[in-house]
Amino acid sequence: MNILRVIVIFLFLGNCFLFSANCFATELSDIFSVNGFGTIGATKTNDQDSGYRSNISTDNVTYEDWNLASRSLVGVQANANWNEQWGSAVQFVQQKQPDSTFADKIQIASVNYMPTPEWVFRLGRSAPRIFMLTDTRNVGFGYLWTHPPIEFYGQLQTTYIDGISATYTKQFGADFLSVSLVGGKTALLMSYPEGNFTADFGQSTGLTLEYEHDEWLFRGTVSRVVNQNQWISSVREYLNSYSTAVPGAGVVSEQLNTHGAKLWFYTLGASYNSQNWVIQSEISRVTATADVIPDTASGYLSIGRHIGDFTPYVMYSHIHTTSQNDSLPSDVTYASQYDSQLNYLAQTSLAFINSRFDQSGVAIGVRWDINSKLALKTQWDRKYINAYGGNLEWNINSANKVTDILSLNLDFVF
Amino acid sequence: MKKLYLIIMVVILCCVSAFPALSAVLVIVNKNNSSRSMDKAEVSALYLGRYQAFKDGSFALPFDLPADGEVRKEFYEKLTGKSVAYINAYWARILFTGRATPPRQLDSDKMVMDVVKKNPSAIGYVSADIKLDSNVKVILRLE
């Protein structure tokens, strides 16, 4: 257990103790509050083969039958405002996730310090701000759709960062400019039928610039992570054992090397929220120095119209891999004809190296705000997935395909 | 079936609706607060958690009215130009990032006025229909 994880659990338990102790204090509600959020969701598709999922970190897969666990979750958050300058928060989220430990379910365990109204410092575990909804994607009540567009939010995404952040906000009349810098470490689970891989993003830094003018919000983020482990170590070891006889096997092994790989996330986002319209769009570029991690470009545009308590909306989203497919070295191809194990290793490696995200989606849906704490949503998605480009799905198809997804969510806060 | 669903959604999306405005809302602070007036942007910043201080740099403590109340709906629509549903969703997003907590909700205009008259850091809003206490002052009128 690393030191940051110990600090996060310490902050979580420490906050719980302080919250409990203050239950006996007078003016309790001035200091302490407990809130929560949740989603009761149901999803089905018309596809019995590929399996829809909301992101690559989950094995909670939906086929033709209604899946009640696909989006369902519950979260509880305790907040304390000790005084004007110090505050703390802990958040625990329960949902169906593979290989999740107690520490993984803690999404926030932080202490906030505000020395002046312009500056906020946070220490501990908090949500990263890579994309506009990265820090709140579990809170269905907080966004318009039944689920964030998977072409944008389904790819490499971390849900927390253990470290420190500093935010400076300046008001210019009716406008606000804020700059945030965050540093720390995080991890990402990738789940596939062949097994789970955990990325150890040991060095993560991010810079976010946000500008708000009336109904408009603009945000730009640059994030950089350095991966510090091998995702596919066993395949690499077998390949290396061939490298003396078949030098190309060593080349392929190096293409699978993820240790020290640097990933850059560039994101631009804008949203417009008025009494009548809610429009949001983001574009993103992800690049990586490792061959096995695909470079991607993605984006989405959502347009909704407030009509009383109802907000119907339409959305388009897209992701594609920008890096070119690689082929095997000629000596590996040749030797594979006579060695079935090498052939298996070579084909498995090629599948990893050429893994692609190539799909588009259109969606139409409606959100009904039943009251200030409850919203009912329904959404129909159609996904256009190119051959071998369905890495967001559970099983990858070798031909172009079209999939329909129907979702129904009841989102609530308390 | 999907075509019908699509048509219904597009028709709803294209519909236009209008809602009548109700009475004015008064934004109040303690009479000892150094602020003489505030504009919409400044009050909006406090109520949306973007900025936490008055003009003089002292920390501000905003108070809210019940979530489903008509005065709150009027206040946010007149102040921000955004629907109350958007405000609720906005605060759900901000609160659950752990970055800020929403203004504390009190049960009535009278409770808001009681808190504001006792606390120089407090800011609240009430319906223009109620009689104001002499220990509070109006810094913004939202029509």
Image: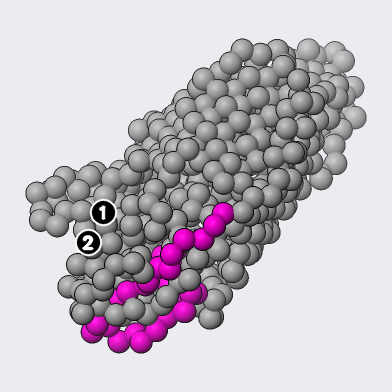
- Answer with left or right where residue A414 lies relative to residue A405: left
Q: Chain of mark 1?
A: B
Residue B68: where, in percent of width, then height? Answer: 39, 48
Q: Residue at x 36, y 69 (%)?
A: B128
Look at the image and say whether residue B46 sits in the magenta stretch.
yes
Identify which amino acid the numbered label 2 is placed on: Met
Q: How is the image coloured?
A: one colour
Q: Position of residue A326 (x, y in %)?
A: 85, 36
Side of A214 where A325 appears, left or right: right
Residue occupied by mark 2: B111
At 61% from the left and 54% from the top, the residue drawn is: B18
User: Residue at (9%, 49%) from the top-left corner?
Assistant: A24
Picture quadrant of residue A105? top left
Using the image, name the chain to which the residue with label 2 belongs: B
Q: Position of residue B95 (x, y in %)?
A: 40, 52
Q: Tag 1: residue type?
A: Asp
Which residue in the structure is indicated by mark 1? B107
Q: CB under 8 Å between callouts 2 and 1?
A: yes
Examine the rendering and report whether any part of residue A207 can be seen. no
- Quick one: SS at disc 1? loop
The image shows residue A20 at horizontal and vertical percentages of 16, 45
- Residue A281 in view in this figure: yes
The local secondary structure at tag 2 comes to helix
Position of the N terminus of chain A, as image quadrant, is: top left
Q: Which residues are magenta?
A: B19-48
Asked if residue A414 is positioned above or below residue B56 in the image, the reply reads: above
